[in-house]
Amino acid sequence: MLRIATFNLENLFTRPSAMSFPSDAPGRQAIEDHAELNGIVAKDAYGSDDKLRLIELSGVYKFHLLDPPDDALVLLQKIRGQLFKKPKNKPLEVVAGGRAEWTGWFELRRENVEWPVTYNTGRVIAETHPDILIVVEVENRPTLMRFCEQVLAPKFQFTYPHCMVIDGNDDRGIDVGIASRFPIVDMRSHVDDLGANGKQVFSRDCPEYDIDLPGGGRIVVIPNHLKSKRNGDDQVSLDRREAQAKQAHAIAMAALTRSDLVILGGDLNDVPDSAPLASLFTDGFADVSTHANWPQDRPGTYDTGLKTGKFDYLIMSPQLHSKLHDVGIERRGTYHPKLWKSFGSVDKTSEASDHHLVWADFDL
């Protein structure tokens, strides 16, 4: 029996402060401003409007100061040259004329994830013992390796010898990756796949991992994290998530030439019957939630498990679907005492994640 799971970790050791508020609203503006700032400073030449906007936003985040305040959500990293100048008794100025005149960037302030949260993340994984685990919102490969070696192994006597994370298109440190008990023998990245608009399709990446299974055979695992609803879900967001889903399905179809066992999983940020995700359930591909053992009272995988919170998926190729044996949702890493019993180490301040781990057993 082979157990495959997907889990949105919401980072293991550090997380952008703007993404750590109880609700989206407080940090949303900082995330949008961070993206705008990096877009401005990437230009070959800075116009007057660009310079005014840089000064305006520095008034909000104080990143022109040598010692910005501790609660500043956006920071400036400067390596060479000067972006700003503050003459004595005069207003702040942007002195760089364009990208070539200085080296630096803007980043989101990060904060440590508290140990009880990291511990409970490990507990969720160890209790379910997946052979192959798709990880979403993980900082990077060294962090995933440290988690396996320094948390899973000593605290739960369970670990993964094979881990991989390919840095994607999101510079906030919320990538997708894989942890496996079996060797990863091939991998492919799709960070540079372009859409009809000439821009990168995937918010993070849609990597492919070929894994050799015991006794022979190979499975292709394709993690993903589609466009979030965090900054609102306007038509632009819907269209981008739909384009990502279509491209991910095309990648999964192409993977069938290497193995008929293909699974695409992760946090897809939408419900199964949504228009943006429709293409993922064509050509015989199906989500593990179609199994009779999938909980019907609370079929969601986020927060309180409502139908409107079904965001996490394991989507199987037809041949893999025929081998599906059992499914489940591990919710005990979250704290909703009126709905289900949590692990004893979990309270409202130490939830492993807002998402629940989804697992599926295959008779291979």
Image (cartoon, helix red, strand yellow):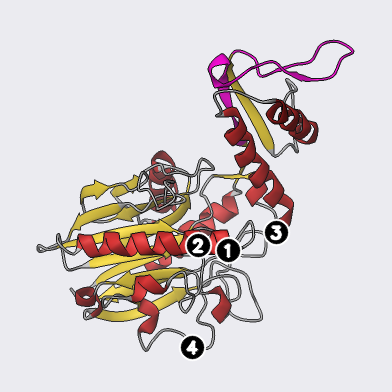
The residue at which mark 1 appears reads as 235
Q: Is label 4 in contact with label 2 (beta carbons under 8 Å)?
A: no
Question: Of discs 3 and 1, which sits in the foreground?
Answer: 1
Q: Report the number of numbered marks.
A: 4
The alpha-carbon separation of the residues under discs 3 and 4 comes to: 28 Å
Which amino acid does the dot numbered 1 rest on? Gln
- Report the residue at 36% width, 53% height from top: 206
Which amino acid does the dot numbered 4 rest on? Gln
Q: In the rendered image, is residue 133 in sight? A: no
- Report the residue at 48% width, 62% height from top: 241
The alpha-carbon separation of the residues under discs 4 and 1 comes to: 30 Å
- Label 1 environment density (alpha carbons within 10 Å; few <14, some 14–19, many ≥20): few
The alpha-carbon separation of the residues under discs 3 and 1 comes to: 25 Å
The residue at which mark 3 appears reads as 22
The residue at which mark 2 appears reads as 239
> Along the polypeptide, which appears first: circle 3 or circle 1?
3
The alpha-carbon separation of the residues under discs 4 and 2 comes to: 29 Å
